[in-house]
Amino acid sequence: MLTINCTINGRAYKFTLDPRMSLMELLRQHGLNSVKQGCSVGECGACTVLIDDVATDTCIYLAVWADGKTIRTTEGEVQHGQLSVVQQAYVDTGAVQCGFCTPGLVMTSTSMVERFRGKRLTEQEIRRGLAGNLCRCTGYTAIVNAVEKAQLLDEETPR
């Protein structure tokens, strides 16, 4: 067993865990159910969270590697009862169907919107950025529209 310290959605945690445990397993055991178990081999993106602001598949990321890291999940994006600009854009554009892939897509989209703040991404750049997240329901058009809208909402948000 190993002990790690990390920050999840703004709160500090200390965990003692089996070094073979994935970060996905750890997060789900602690009630963060937006982190979905899909393929378990890093192909579908359903388990995507931000680790130090980088979109990361947690199914292939060992929990011990999270020592000293800052982790953000979809649950942590809601602030003071308000959806994040990305979450709101997904709602506004109807970019959600069955919802299984949505949390991972939201976190990947959040990473893109934050990383490219001030630069309007093209449709092709957005599609390339979302390539690690699979969705069987939407056809991606509404998801691309959500990222485009999130960029606009982000520009309007005072800092």
Image (cartoon, grey):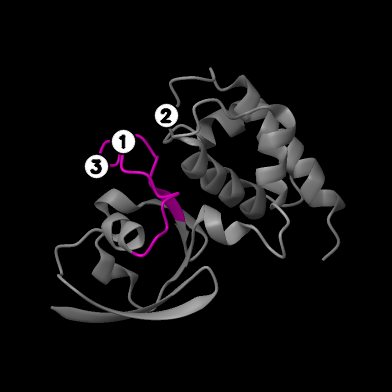
Which residues make up the magenta segment? 30-49
Tell me, yes or no, if residue 120 can be seen here. no
Magenta-colored stretch includes residue 37: yes
Write the residue at 15% across / 70% down.
Answer: 18
* Residue type, label 2: Leu
Callout in the foreground (3, 1): 3
Q: Position of residue 42 (x, y in %)?
A: 29, 42
Q: Assign a secondary structure to mark 2.
A: loop
Q: Closer to the camera, 122 or 64?
A: 64
> Label 1: which residue?
43
Q: Are marks 1 and 2 in contact (CB under 8 Å)?
A: yes
68 displayed left or right of 81: left
Whole-number angstrom distance, CA of label 2 to CA of label 3: 13 Å
Query: Could you classify mark 2 by the number of other residues whose Cα lies within 10 Å: few (under 14), some (14-19), or many (20 or more)?
Result: some
Q: Assign a secondary structure to mark 3.
A: loop
Write the residue at 58% across / 43% down.
Answer: 109
Q: Position of residue 98 (x, y in %)?
A: 49, 27
> Label 2: which residue?
134
> Label 3: which residue?
40
Q: Main secondary structure of the magenta part?
A: loop
* Residue type, label 3: Ser
